[in-house]
Amino acid sequence: MAISSGFNWPQGQRCAVSLTYDDALPVHHQVVAPLLAAKGLTATFNVNAHGGFTDDPDAWRSVAALGHELGNHTLFHPCRRVPVENYGWLAPHYDLCDYTPRRWADEMRVANCLLKLVDGRSERTFGNTCCHTTIGQGDHETSLDDLISTLFVAARGAMNRTVIGPGSLRYTALGHFSGDAKTVAELWQDIERAVEQGGWIIFMFHGVGKGTHNLYIDTDQHARLVDDLAGRAGNIWTASMVKVAGYLKQAGYTGR
């Protein structure tokens, strides 16, 4: 079904696709961003400042110059350290279970400031670390929705494998799919759902190629995906999250 009666994607395209890449990996600025730009596509690169971002800010300035979005992926990549055995890599002091709203917002503002110094932009989206959408615990567990709404155009939210349409349009927690370890055929099964519904589909990737991250898509599968999306630019709009969210807001979709 169509996203809504009377709604049109740019140039009559039938759906929107946003590719997002997490953790500021060297392969993102060395390979992925130039590859996408060469095909006329833009993406969102979610960078966390304590990773590769601060090692080479000029590389990320080049990514932004290609038209891509530098999404906020926090300063220190905090996550909910529950269950502990699944998050052994996470330092205890970066446990979202122990964060207060003030601490989270303060860190996001600093991260936004760092990103603006690199790309000059004031509007951007948030890539939830570990797909987590709350801070605190017990009676003090709090949704990030209100904080996100004051700091970002939109947030990727949980990995719920849901195509985004007007009935589920929640800018503070849009929902997305994982692209890691997927084949082109598997990814296109999900994209075709978005085409059929006339909606927006967001994919989260980490590494591109073996050795770039413990979570990754094979280099050849990724290259084929990019080629296929470029080949279908006439009916599929592949763009960064901030561009798609901005388009929907301008079209009058205020979300819920």
Image (cartoon, rainbow, N blue to C red):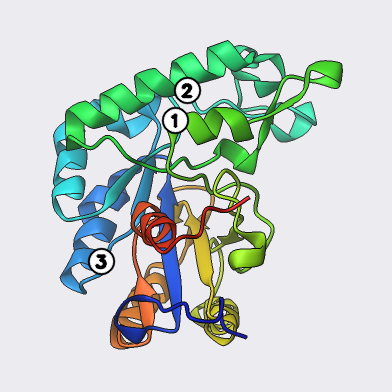
Task: Estimate how packed mark 3 is, as few (under 14), some (14 to 19) or many (20 or more) residues with alpha carbons within 10 Å.
Answer: many
Mark 2 and mark 1 in contact (Cβ < 8 Å)?
no
Secondary element at image label 2: loop
Relative vertical location of residue 76 with respect to residue 252 in this rendering, above or below: above
Q: Position of residue 187 (x, y in %)?
A: 54, 76
Mark 3 and mark 1 in contact (Cβ < 8 Å)?
no
Residue at 55% in and 12% down:
103
Q: Quadrant of the N terminus?
A: bottom right
Q: Position of residue 153 (x, y in %)?
A: 42, 43
Secondary element at image label 1: helix
Q: CA distance from mark 3 to mark 2?
A: 27 Å
Residue at 59% in and 68% down:
165
- Residue hosting label 2: 76
Q: State which mark lies toward you, 1 or 3.
A: 1
Q: State which mark lies toward you, 1 or 2.
A: 1
Residue at 86% in and 18% down:
139
Relative vertical location of residue 122 with respect to residue 177 in this rendering, above or below: above
Q: Earlier in the sequence, mark 1 or mark 3?
A: 3
Q: CA distance from mark 1 to mark 3?
A: 27 Å
Quadrant in the picture for residue 78? top right
Task: Estimate how packed mark 2 is, as few (under 14), some (14 to 19) or many (20 or more) residues with alpha carbons within 10 Å.
Answer: some
Q: Earlier in the sequence, mark 3 or mark 2?
A: 3
Quadrant in the picture for residue 57? top left
Secondary element at image label 3: helix
- The amino acid type of the residue labelled 3 equals Leu
Q: Position of residue 145 (x, y in %)?
A: 62, 35
- The amino acid type of the residue labelled 1 equals Leu
- Residue hosting label 1: 151
Relative vertical location of residue 200 with respect to residue 190 in this rendering, above or below: above
In the image, which disc is placed on residue 36?
A: 3
Q: Give the total number of marks visible in the rendering.
A: 3
Q: CA distance from mark 1 to mark 2?
A: 17 Å
